[in-house]
């Protein structure tokens, strides 16, 4: 019981808010605004969460936990704003989607090596050039039997196995964004793998997941945007929608010439 309370206390304080990250941009270069948002499969059609999807002037939106119901309302609401929309349906919370203002030249589903959630690899023609995008939803910190306590300590290897498999499918020559619900914080195994491979993290310094309990609200930074061969302009979390996750917004430019 004492250990459980200590872990709960850690969750309660780990996600304290900090100012949004902003780096000096080059006004002569075009920007690309990317949003990643786990909309929560059980909230399909929720008006507040639907509004949160399009609450910023994004060029590219990556969604996780989409469903056929989410596709219906999202296309109806944002189909005129985003001419390139794709959904991939999976069991329950495994669905993924992309809404893009720019042409998607390639899109392929990447099956999980552990049989849980797939990822989607995209190539998108943008003002920054041809970009490679990986939309992911990694294994949650829970065991097969539904134990969250044990899962917090035992599932990091599963996420590492997933990321290793997905990473092998990336084109190393293309500027790349890996974004979505990592289900782990910045010290997690999947993120550390990407850092070793030259990726940087768009870090707004704020939690992206919250869950209310009788003891208080648990908060963690589980959603991330990792990037390589690009320059980050800003990153921020939006306190919008009813999902247990929050939208994470990042702005990019082409790499600056030193």
Image (cartoon, rainbow, N blue to C red):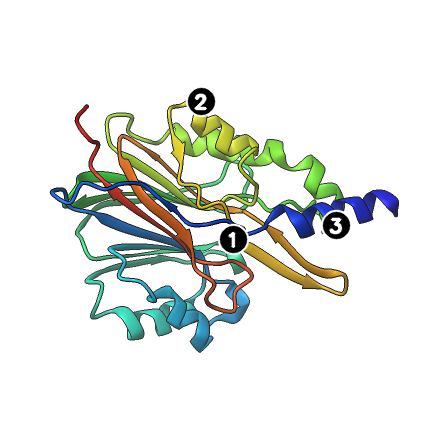
Location of mark 3 (residue): 8
Residue 155 is situated, as x and y percent measured from the top left of the image, at 65, 37
Q: How far is the residue under mark 1 from the one under mark 2?
A: 24 Å
User: Where is residue 66 drawn, in percent x and y?
Assistant: 44, 61
Image point (21%, 32%), residue name: 255
The residue at 20%/47% (across/down) is: 31
- Label pair 1/3, CB-CB below 8 angstroms: no
Q: Residue sitting at 40 percent across and 67 percent down?
A: 52
Q: Nearer the viewer, residue 106 or 231?
A: 231
Q: Quadrant of the C terminus?
A: top left
Q: Position of residue 179 (x, y in %)?
A: 40, 44
Residue 253 placement: quadrant: top left
Mark 1 or 2, which is nearer the eye? 1
Q: Which residue is mark 2?
A: 196
Q: Is residue 175 above or below residue 91?
A: above
Label 1: which residue? 208
Looking at the rendered structure, the secondary structure element under dot 3 is helix
Camera sees residue 111: yes
Disc 1 crowd, CA 10 A, few/some/many (<14, 14-19, 20+): many
Q: Residue furthest bottom?
A: 47
Q: Would residue 87 appear left or right of 191 to someone viewing this image?
A: left
Residue located 44% across and 22% down the image = 196
Describe the element under mark 2 as helix, strand or loop: helix
Left or right of 117? Residue 135 is left
Q: Provide the secondary structure element on which disc 1 rests.
A: loop
Task: Name, please, the residue furthest toward the left.
Answer: 28
């Amino acid at each position: 019981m004492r250990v459980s309370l200590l872990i709960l206390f850690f969750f309660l304080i780990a996600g304290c808010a900090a100012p949004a990250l902003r780096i000096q941009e080059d006004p002569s270069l075009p920007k690309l605004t990317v949003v990643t948002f786990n909309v929560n499969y059980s909230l399909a059609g929720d008006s507040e969460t639907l509004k949160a999807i399009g609450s910023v002037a994004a060029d590219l939106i990556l969604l996780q936990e989409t469903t056929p119901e989410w596709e219906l309302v999202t296309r109806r609401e944002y189909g005129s704003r985003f001419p390139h929309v794709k959904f991939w349906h999976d069991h329950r919370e495994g669905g993924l989607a992309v809404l893009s203002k720019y042409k998607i030249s390639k899109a392929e589903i990447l099956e999980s090596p552990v049989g849980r959630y797939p990822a989607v690899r995209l190539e998108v023609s943008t003002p920054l050039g041809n970009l490679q995008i990986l939309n992911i939803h990694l294994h949650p910190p829970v065991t097969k039997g539904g134990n969250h306590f044990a899962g917090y300590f035992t599932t990091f290897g599963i996420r590492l196995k997933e990321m290793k498999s997905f990473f092998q499918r990336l084109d190393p020559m293309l500027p790349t964004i890996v974004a979505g619900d990592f289900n782990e914080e910045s010290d997690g195994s999947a993120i550390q793998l990407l850092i070793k491979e030259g990726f940087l993290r768009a870090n707004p310094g704020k939690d992206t997941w919250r869950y209310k309990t009788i003891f208080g609200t648990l908060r963690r930074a589980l959603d991330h945007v990792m990037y390589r061969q690009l320059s980050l302009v800003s990153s921020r979390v939006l306190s919008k929608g009813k999902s247990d996750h929050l939208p994470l917004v990042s702005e990019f430019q082409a790499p600056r010439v030193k």
